[in-house]
Amino acid sequence: MGGVSGSMALAQAFDEIMGQPGSSVPRAPLSPLGNWIDGTPDAELRRRQEAAEATFRQLGITFAVYGDSDASERIIPFDIVPRIFLNSEWNRLSEGLIQRVQAINAFLDDIYGARRILDEGILPPDLIFGNPQFRPEIAGMRPPHGIWAHICGIDLVRTGPDEFFVLEDNARTPSGVSYMLENREAMLRLCPELFREFRVAAVDSYPDRLLETMKSVAPGNVAAPVCVVLTPGHYNSAYYEHSFLADSMGIELVEAADLVVDDDVVWMRTIAGRVKVDVIYRRIDDDYLDPLVFRPDSMLGVPGLIAAYAAGNVALINAPGNGIADDKAIYSYMPEIVKFYSGSEPKLPNVETWRCREPQALKYVLDNLEKVVVKLVDGSGGYGMLVGPTASKAEVETFRAALIAEPHRYIAQPTLALSTVPTLADSGLAPRHVDFRPFVLTGSRGVQVVPGGLTRVALKEGSLVVNSSQGGGTKDSFVLMDDGAPPPAPPAQTQMQSQGIG
Amino acid sequence: MRLTIDHRTVYRFSEPQARLTQLLRLSPEDTYDQSVTGWSLHVDCDARMREGRDGFGNKVTMLYVEGPITGIEIAVSGEVLTNPSHGVVNGAAEPLPPPLFLRATPLTERDDAIAAFANDAVAGENDPVARMHALNGAVRKQFTLDEGRPVSGRTAAEAFGLKTATSRDLAHILATAARSLNVPARYVSGYSTVDADDAPAPHGWVEVHIDGLGWVAFDPWTGICADEAYARIAVALDAAGAAPVAGSRLGEGDEEMDVDVHVEGGEGQ
């Protein structure tokens, strides 16, 4: 039916399936997907998509949009057409992700310890010490095994076959992994034929890998460390994910009231009595972790938890204080940070970023407001953001005034031609822009990238904003275990290729 | 000077509590000009105690009490010998660098009125030490001293609008004012003979960082430097961060707190 090649609306963007702009056939290794799209009527695709969404609604995979009264009823829309990474693409990407996450861990260990990076003049000190994300409350404390960012969700965008850029480092409590797992489960159930056409790396080992990572960072030499997931409770928008992860790892999901700190040791209350807790995957922000150290009005935290952590008696995943590593003001220095700790050039570049606190950068941004994306340094989720090319004149002028008033609160980036993936729109299949959040785990035995991730898609035609709070959806993300079966070659050609010694 | 200190904190609960968890900052430590010659921390119930350090490098004691418990008395007493040092602090653990202490906190939020006051106070002074003396003196002159118990949660900006101020209020105002002049400033909690007998709280003052000199202690309660009549316990960005007791209890009902501080100064060394 040709829905993919039919739409030329976003012709200048690289398409993950079709390849270079203007291509009318899928990239060679992905031709089976083209055949699948052509051979499956839109109505059938839509039926399967609705079946997947019905399951998500039933499971309660919902999210809250701020300022929306029926928030608990919302699910993130799911798109049935997967995005696919070739094995070679994935391997290169993984190398860059590992390098980046190793640097994030080294940076956190340094900035709360010796602060070598400041002594060497790589970062301006006021960027750290004036930044609320640098938490003096935990300075000098070191997590077990020296690992801070056990789970990172690195947001990436792509503009070409090998052009990936990091958009945001999420080193606090990145969410979304339940979508990676549930989306795959839905695809396996609804589109089993795709998994016969492609050898897709499994993602369902994620809970095992996470549990292994947690156990590996337990303090001391405990034979069977006790691990738990700490949730703020069922009112939290990501509660489904918290219970899902605890359930799939086979460990307890606890709230603050279930934990007690005594003698600098964390205990879990159970029917059978107290059980010592070694590792806590906490889905509570730093501010609420321990009312004795952070916000005293916190009802979600555990009094004494930071003392237990400081004494080296419990591992917190991720470590408190990590916000300084994924802060938007720090982001623009990440290439220097990666270079400083890894000793080599970053394999994954940043998106070019103008720091509006610098007068020259501010001037450029003000002169080019209709071309750039402007972001609040301390904003998230697509709030407080200007996408110049699609913004109205009034929106541009509002941001101009805000930038002039408080330039230090903003950064700006060029509008990238984000890659697209064919997506089922009202009018049929059409390219829509996507980003990608892979999940990187760091334990005491090393760093690993889970072969998959969360693809977010901007469902509105031409939109570059993929956040779920702004009308984004998700897709499954296939990582192929090879670069696709090469087309069958005649025997003679094979023989010819093996000659060469002359 | 030989400072003899007795500091008693009593909590009474209207209902029995199932457990108490408290973080105590009640232990002075040695610096070049302060030596602790004897110190004891006593609790009137069965409690588990653990020593550690907070992020600012202050010595802390974690106190864990299993209920049911209807009250607790925490008593510290001891002796600290001090040398005159013109307020200059030497030999303290300094895990965080001065620029960190330019930050505002909820209790020391930047405030236009305080910033304007600070600018006026230092007008015409160029020497950094003279500027701080001028600022400290101006804060002293602005308020009538309030020897009562500090009001929990009162911000520097709120205190600045009043006529009387506790030592905590004055220290918050001075820290906020110094930071508005781009001078790093921190809150100090400790003991001093300048307080009346039976003081309802430990004393609060300020240390500011002056290039070439280091941290220098100013007390807006007296309008001069905090010197040998002072024993420092803890520093932080504000009084909440240096609180002698940060506690959490598991149980219903209200609590009453009573604090008694006695500091006596004698001939030292």
Image: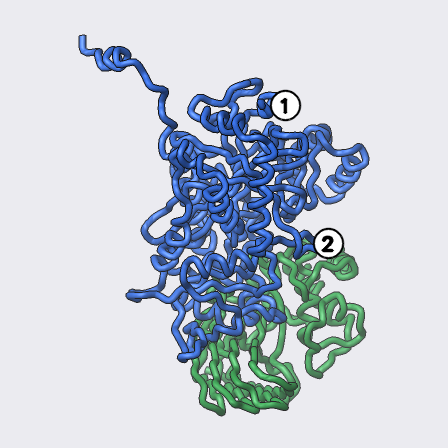
Q: Nearer the viewer, residue A358 or A366?
A: A366
Is tag 1's residue or tag 2's residue first in the polypeptide sequence? 1
For mark 2, does the 10 Å Cα neighbourhood hold few (<14), some (14 to 19), or many (20 or more) residues?
Answer: few
Task: Name the front one of labels 1 and 2.
Answer: 1
Residue type marked 1: Ser
Q: Can residue B225 be seen at all in this image of the molecule?
A: no
Q: What percent of the width, then of the height, locates residue B158?
A: 76, 69
The relative height of residue A170 versus residue A222 in the rendered view (above or below) is above
For mark 1, does the 10 Å Cα neighbourhood hold few (<14), some (14 to 19), or many (20 or more) residues?
Answer: some
Q: Can residue B149 be seen at all in this image of the molecule?
A: yes
* Picture residue at 52% right of the left edge, 78% below the top: B22
Q: Nearer the viewer, residue A64 or A121?
A: A64
Chain letter for mark 2, please: A
Residue placed farthest to the left in the image? A502
Q: What percent of the width, then of the height, locates residue B26?
A: 51, 79
Q: Residue B177 falls in which quadrant of the image?
A: bottom right
Tell me the number on the disc at residue A67: 2
Q: Which chain is green?
A: B
The residue tagged 1 is A7
Direction from residue A457 to residue A460 in the image, left or right: right
The relative height of residue A468 versus residue A4 in the rendered view (above or below) is below
